[in-house]
């Protein structure tokens, strides 16, 4: 089985609401690592080896040690600081003020290359959070030795001062030819392609070179488009018993989809599995910590 390697920053998230003032880890890397561990621990089928490459400041190494103690293989690149998000919410949770109070060192090829010696066509999941986390050079090099999975969210966010602003991805058409799997949602899709129709959007991304597009549409389900077959598969969503926290659901969907694909599942089966895992994630705060048996129970219904 192909190894799955997630590269991304574990963040320090400060969440302030009228009721709570909370400091917790976050980021794609965090949701990937805990989700993979939960699935692997509960799966009777063989699963791919996996690891996380991250960069945090010394003050946040506690989060890394928590993952290592749980059995996750984590490699840490030196960084003077951690990505620090401050999210303030009012009574209306749809209104958020977001600031970035510090940034970690970006992932460059000269720092990554020594950690990737001898890898054999792995899946690389790039957990981009901000536009300068990964350069085009990194994507190009990773594509030469494995399959590149990119969540586009980070490439569409830049930091000006401490403020997070929406932006387009200037190098998108050049970079996307090296992306094997692209994860996006309906809002990012519109910014990226200028198309508000999902079918037109995924076809445009295919024309730019993306091999496979994962387009999530919230409770409307998801689309998976494969360029080689020129085929779009519609995936039904599964309603949660209780909607608690949507943070990290997109990351969880991508993680679960790649998890099942490396086990040999079809696009349809992997997409349905990912949708069920995302539903279980919606029912609680923090990363997915359910079991494969719970996922299969949802699929059975």
Image (cartoon, grey):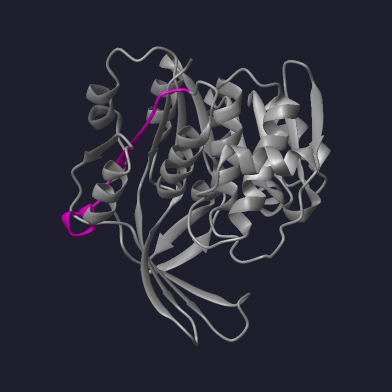
Answer whether residue 231 is visible to the viewer in this image.
yes
Q: Check if residue 109 falls in the magenta segment.
A: no
Asked whether 204 or 120 is in front, the reply is 120
Picture quarter with the C terminus: top right
Q: Would you place residue 270 above or below residue 166 in this image?
A: above
Task: Please tell me which residue is depicted at 65% across the width and 41% down the height of the picture.
Answer: 295
Residue 64: image location, x then y, percent: 27, 48
Image quarter for residue 107? Answer: top left
* Left or right of residue 268, residue 155 in this image: left
Q: Would you place residue 90 above or below residue 283 in this image?
A: below
Residue 239: image location, x then y, percent: 76, 55
Task: Please tell me which residue is depicted at 33% across the width and 37% down the height of the picture.
Answer: 72
Task: Please tell me which residue is depicted at 18% across the width and 53% down the height of the picture.
Answer: 80
Image quarter for residue 184? Answer: top right
Asked whether 217 or 239 is in front, the reply is 239
Task: Please tell me which residue is depicted at 67% across the width and 51% down the height of the picture.
Answer: 279
Residue 258: image location, x then y, percent: 56, 30
Asked whether 106 or 281 is in front, the reply is 281
* Left or right of residue 136, residue 150 in this image: right
Q: Would you place residue 8 above or below residue 63 in this image?
A: above
* Left or right of residue 86, residue 156 in this image: right
Q: Check if residue 54 falls in the magenta segment.
A: yes
Image quarter for residue 37? Answer: top left
Answer whether residue 215 is visible to the viewer in this image.
no
Magenta residues (range): 48-61
**How many numbered marks, from 0 up?**
0
Residue 39: image location, x then y, percent: 51, 37
């Amino acid at each position: 089985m192909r190894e799955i390697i997630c590269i991304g920053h574990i963040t320090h998230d400060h969440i302030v609401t009228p009721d709570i003032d909370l400091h917790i880890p976050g980021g794609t890397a965090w949701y990937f690592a805990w989700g993979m561990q939960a699935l692997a621990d509960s799966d009777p089928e063989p699963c791919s080896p996996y690891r996380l490459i991250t960069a945090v400041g010394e003050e946040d190494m506690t989060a890394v040690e928590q993952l290592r103690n749980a059995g996750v293989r984590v490699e840490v690149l030196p960084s003077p600081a951690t990505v620090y998000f401050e999210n303030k919410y009012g009574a209306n949770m749809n209104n958020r003020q977001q600031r970035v109070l510090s940034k970690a060192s970006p992932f460059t090829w000269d720092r990554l290359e020594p950690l990737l010696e001898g890898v054999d066509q792995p899946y690389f999941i790039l957990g981009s959070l901000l536009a300068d986390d990964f350069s085009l050079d990194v994507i190009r090099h990773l594509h030469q030795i494995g399959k590149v999975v990119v969540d586009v969210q980070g490439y569409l966010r830049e930091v000006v001062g401490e403020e997070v602003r929406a932006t387009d991805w200037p190098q998108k058409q050049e970079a996307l030819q090296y992306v094997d799997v692209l994860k996006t949602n309906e809002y990012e899709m519109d910014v990226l392609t200028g198309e508000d129709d999902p079918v037109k959007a995924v076809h445009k991304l295919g024309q730019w070179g993306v091999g496979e597009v994962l387009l999530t549409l919230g409770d409307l389900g998801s689309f998976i488009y494969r360029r080689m077959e020129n085929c779009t598969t519609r995936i039904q969503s599964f309603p949660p018993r209780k909607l608690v926290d949507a943070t990290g659901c997109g990351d969880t969907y991508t993680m679960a989809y790649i998890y099942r694909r490396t086990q040999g599942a079809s696009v349809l089966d992997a997409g349905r599995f990912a949708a069920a895992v995302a539903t279980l994630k919606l029912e609680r705060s923090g990363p997915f910590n359910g079991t494969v048996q719970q996922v299969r129970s949802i699929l059975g219904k």
